[in-house]
Image (tube, rainbow, N blue to C red):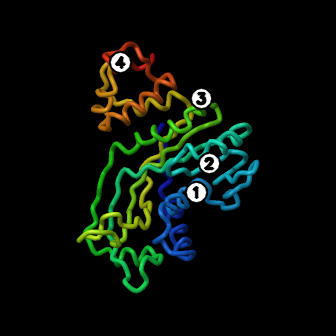
Amino acid sequence: MHIEPDKELFEEAKNTMILRLQGEKGIGTLSEKTVHSVLKYYFAPDEKYHEIKIDGFVADVCIDGEIHEIQTKQFYLMKRKLNSFLKEHEVTIVYPVSVENTLHWVECDEENGNDPLTYEEMTRRSITKSRKVRKKAMPYLFFHELYGIKEFLHHPNLHFTLAILSTEEYRLLDGYGASRKIRATKADKIPTELLDLIEIREPADYKIFLPESLPETFTSEIFSKKAGIARDLASTALNILYELKIVDRISKIGNAYVYRITE
């Protein structure tokens, strides 16, 4: 289910958190902390709801008993936390998805090495032409993450929100090779625009991931072509969709399952 983002609130969250993080330690060593912090502020502008201790764990956001966890990857690491939280709380995992990314290469300071840089400094030192990449298949990586918490997917208290973002990624020219780009340091990823919000609150909401041009029956190979994703990712997605009874397995062709959408 698509939800219209609050553009004004996102701009406030972005500007507030980038300024604060620069003041703390600069941007250059934050990895994806900026994405996490901006989204946490977006979902809870009142910071009294941030970092709430519950049953020996810390929730990113908890408002009136409803928890939001911002998780950029590795859902499987949340298993113990989910076991605890889901007993008495509604839990929404917010998954950031960068579908449009502008890559900047940043010249290193020879004197200071990889010391943290502010956003302005990184922009000023961006000496190579930025490259914008649109990645339409990125939302399907959600299924790789779901596979790690597959046992929780039927729990009525567990929900998901995909935050579809445009981002700017900064990498330091401190790697190997003539270009210095091999194994270079990923300085940070800055969210620049919240393009869409996709809410998953019940199994039927997963149908948004079914390509419109799917034939009546299909294999993972056909699904991968229609969705524009790799074959192994298509297999993982169909595994999850089958678990949620969005698709049925009706037969096999060799080792490949044949699927159809559940009525």
Question: In front of the other: label 2 or label 4?
Answer: 4
Instruction: Measure how far apart labels 4 and 1 are at the Cα level.
Output: 41 Å
Instruction: Measure how far apart labels 3 and 4 are at the Cα level.
Output: 24 Å
Residue lying at the far bottom in this picture: please name it.
Answer: 111
The residue beneath circle 4 is 258
Question: In front of the other: label 3 or label 2?
Answer: 3
Question: In front of the other: label 3 or label 4?
Answer: 4
Question: In front of the other: label 4 or label 1?
Answer: 4
The residue beneath circle 1 is 40
State which tag comes first along the sequence, 2 or 1.
Answer: 1
Residue 12 in the image: state x and y as whole percent: 52, 64
The residue beneath circle 3 is 154
Residue 261 in the image: state x and y as whole percent: 41, 20
Give the residue type that dot 2 points to.
His
Give the residue type that dot 4 points to.
Val
State which tag comes first along the sequence, 3 or 2.
Answer: 2
Instruction: Give residue 230's quadrant in the image.
Output: top left
201 w.r.t. 14: above or below: above
Instruction: Give residue 88's quadrant in the image.
Output: top right
Give the residue type that dot 1 points to.
Lys
State which tag comes first along the sequence, 4 or 1.
Answer: 1
Question: In front of the other: label 3 or label 1?
Answer: 3
In the foreground, 251 or 189: 251
Instruction: Measure how far apart labels 3 and 2 are at the Cα level.
Output: 18 Å
